[in-house]
Amino acid sequence: MFFPKLAQRFPNLSGWNYLIKTVAPRRDLVRKAIEEHQRTIQFDGHPRDFIDTFLQSIKTTDDTSSSFYGEAASKKFGHAF
């Protein structure tokens, strides 16, 4: 993980393949949960959980230096409002 280019060059030896194999299902699980929340979120000020709070922060921030603002949030978190 300290030398990603080297790890990718020798994926079995470095453990890169194992890392990708174990991280991908978790990433997909989180992505599906976020997508479900995006479809069902109610912006009434009463979040159901952390994901709703997170999405509300993205929707309501007007601080241009925030990672929750505009294009930065869309690129970083993989969605747009």
Image (cartoon, grey):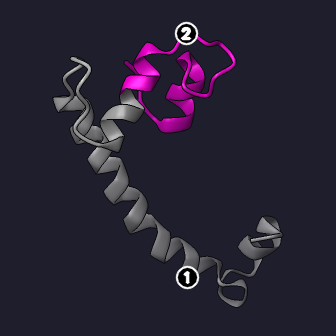
- Percent x, y for residue 76? 56, 35
Q: Residue at x 39, y 65 (%)?
A: 26
Question: Could you say which is closer to the camera, residue 55 or residue 22?
Answer: 55
Q: Whole-percent x and y of residue 22?
A: 46, 76
Amino acid identity at mark 1? Tyr
Helix, strand, or loop for circle 2? loop
Disc 2: CA contacts within 10 A as few (<14), some (14-19) or many (>=20): few
Rendering coords of residue 43 (x, y %): 24, 18
Name the amino acid type tagged 2: Asp
- Of the 4 image quadrants, the one containing the C terminus is top left
Q: Earlier in the sequence, mark 1 or mark 2?
A: 1
73 sits left or right of 57 in the view: right
The answer to which of 11 and 34 lies nearer the viewer is 34
Q: Residue at x 26, y 20 (%)?
A: 45
Task: Write the start and end of the magenta stretch as one range.
Answer: 56-81
Find the distance from the CA under tag 1 to the CA under tag 2.
40 Å
The residue singled out by tag 1 in the image is 18
Q: Residue furthest bottom?
A: 13
Name the residue carrying label 2: 62
Are the two marked residues, 1 and 2, in contact with CB atoms closer than 8 angstroms?
Answer: no
Is 30 within the magenta? no
Q: Residue at x 32, y 58 (%)?
A: 29
Q: Is residue 62 magenta?
A: yes
Q: Is residue 24 above or below residue 7?
A: above
The image quarter in which residue 46 lies: top left
Where does residue 48 sit, x and y in percent of width and height? Answer: 22, 38
Query: In the image, 30: left or right of 78?
Result: left
Between circles 1 and 2, the one closer to the viewer is 2
Residue at 75% from the left image edge and 75% from the top image edge: 7
Question: Which of the labelled discs sits on residue 81, or is there none?
Answer: none
Residue 64 to residue 56: above or below? above
